[in-house]
Amino acid sequence: MKYKIRRIVCLLLLIVFSLGVTTVNNESKFTIKSNNLTEDISVVVQNGDTIWDIVESYYNDINKPFYADKRYVVNYVSDYNNGSDLKIGQTILIPKDIK
């Protein structure tokens, strides 16, 4: 009798664990999509702007890892926008969440 109860408990734990892992994976996929669609700051480049100046203006609005200094964020934003060449009137996207 104890053996059957242990098997049932183990089976239930396995099922609950499997459902939990599936739920976590689905949530992370959703988060990645939502970051790309809704979590960007749009900035229109003005005369004399640099990526460094733009990042500096929005630095406190960006969620970033503890090790990310301004240089890290500037490089991330530059890569996110396919390079650091700016043109007047160009729209730069700054992600609110940086990994």
Image: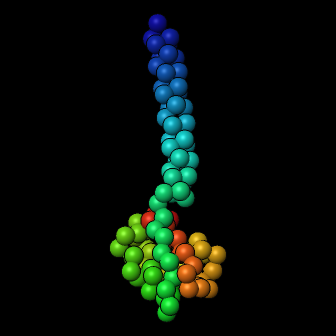
Way the structure is coloured = rainbow
Q: Is residue 21 above or below residue 63?
A: above
State the image coordinates of residue 88 (x, y, percent, origin top left): 56, 86
Residue toward you, 11 or 77 = 77
State the image coordinates of residue 38 (x, y, percent, origin top left): 48, 57
State the image coordinates of residue 22 (x, y, percent, origin top left): 55, 36
Quadrant hosting residue 26: top right
Q: Is residue 13 above or below residue 86?
A: above
Residue 63 in view of the camera: yes
Q: Residue at x 51, y 52 (%)?
A: 34
Q: Residue at x 46, y 19 (%)?
A: 9
Quadrant hosting residue 58: bottom left
Residue toward you, 22 or 43 = 43
Residue toward you, 34 or 1 = 34
Residue farthest to the front, as pictured = 89
Residue 21 in view of the camera: no
Q: Residue at x 52, y 71 (%)?
A: 93
Q: Residue at x 39, y 76 (%)?
A: 59
Q: Left or right: 2 with respect to 92?
A: left
State the image coordinates of residue 27 (x, y, percent, origin top left): 50, 44
